[in-house]
Image (cartoon, rainbow, N blue to C red):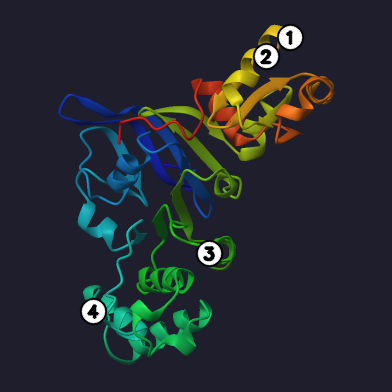
Amino acid sequence: MSEMSCVLVDQLEHSYGDRVALCGVSFKIQRGSIFGFVGPNGGGKTTLFNVLCTLLPVQSGTVESLGFRLDRECTEYRRNIGVTFQAPSLDRRLTVRENLIHQGHLYGLRGKSLDRQATQLLERFGVADRSANIVETLSGGLKRRVELAKCLLHRPRLLLLDEPSTGLDPGARRELWQCLEELRARDSVTVVVTTHLMEEAERCDELILLDQGSIAAEGTPSVLREGISGESVTVVSERPEELRAQLVSELGLEFSRSGETLTMRSSDGHKVLRDIVERFSAEIRSISVDKPTLEDVFMEKTGRRMSDEVTVD
């Protein structure tokens, strides 16, 4: 594995009986980066995450992380990673500080060094004034901060976060990502996140788009977006199916539909917008023209929207 690489995955496959969850997945993650596994629910990202945190075995292929082979060096590897799962792992009936102290004991930390490390992390994540509070009294955003502090007690080199923004309001989500960026910049910790939220994917240094167990696209967010031509036209209507049929018959415009939203790409999105407004203004709730997004990338590569759930995970 290259000195610059933190994780190297080669031809990874995983199945649950006859159901294939990962099919020949290969990628690498650079040290000190924020890397995203992005895809719809059921696309394979949770299975991949669980292999990386050793909850699932390597069935076929090779996974090397932090210099360890995950098919034979799991014990030492686990000492070097921090994991935050989608479901909260804090003990709700203990105080914030008690949660950290008990976590430290699991890693063999004791005494003054553990107390000092816990205090420093609570201060760093802005929850030192809540150290004596029972966890179940905290807001979702504060709980996530405590989760991060907890999984960093043993100074891991790799941080694995499964859907870290679940249950957080937009403000708490922004604070979480500020914390992750500070970790990467200050401590050179490599951060891996799974997400189905495109605004989070945009904050990753690099990412892979997973669909039905395979990589549909990979690269930096900007490079992926630049690979899509044209502009995205989005129309919201109370009668989307009826409007879509009219757009085809009267203007020759082919839109895809998701709920009340119609979307298409065009080389001249503003002309399309004008034509629709002139003819169908009474039938649209809103209309916009935007540059390509990661959602557009996913749709271009897979033929589906990110919200269209599959059954692979």
- The three-letter code of the residue at mark 4 reads His
Residue depicted at 80% across the width and 19% down the height? 279
**Image quadrant containing the C terminus:** top left
Q: Earlier in the sequence, mark 3 or mark 2?
A: 3
Q: Is residue 4 visible?
A: no
| Residue identifier under label 1 | 250
Camera-nearest residue between 125 and 143: 143
Considering the numbered disc 2 on the image, is that residue within a helix, a strand or a loop? helix
Q: Which mark is residue 176?
A: 3
Q: Position of residue 254 (x, y in %)?
A: 65, 14
Q: Which mark is residue 246?
A: 2
Q: Position of residue 170 (x, y in %)?
A: 58, 60
Answer whether labels 3 and 2 touch (C-beta < 8 Å).
no
Q: Which comes sooner in the sequence, label 3 or label 1?
A: 3
In the figure, 296 relative to 1: above or below?
above
In the rendering, at what x and y percent does residue 50 appear? 29, 47
- Which marked residue is nearer to the observer: mark 4 or mark 1? 1
Of circles 3 and 1, the one toward us is 1
Q: Is residue 132 visible in this depiction of the protein? A: yes
Q: Nearer the viewer, mark 3 or mark 2?
A: 2
Residue drawn at x 74%, y 22% is: 230
Check disc 2 and give the amino acid type: Gln
> Marks 3 and 1, how far apart in space?
48 Å
Q: Is the residue under label 2 in contact with that under label 1 (CB below 8 Å)?
A: yes
Query: Disc 1 residue type?
Result: Glu
Tell me, for residue 105, which label it has, or none.
4
Return the x and y of residue 80 as percentages of the image width and height.
Answer: 33, 62
Q: Earlier in the sequence, mark 2 or mark 4?
A: 4
Find numbered disc 4 in the image and state the secondary structure of the residue it sits on: helix
The foreground one among 175 and 26 is 175
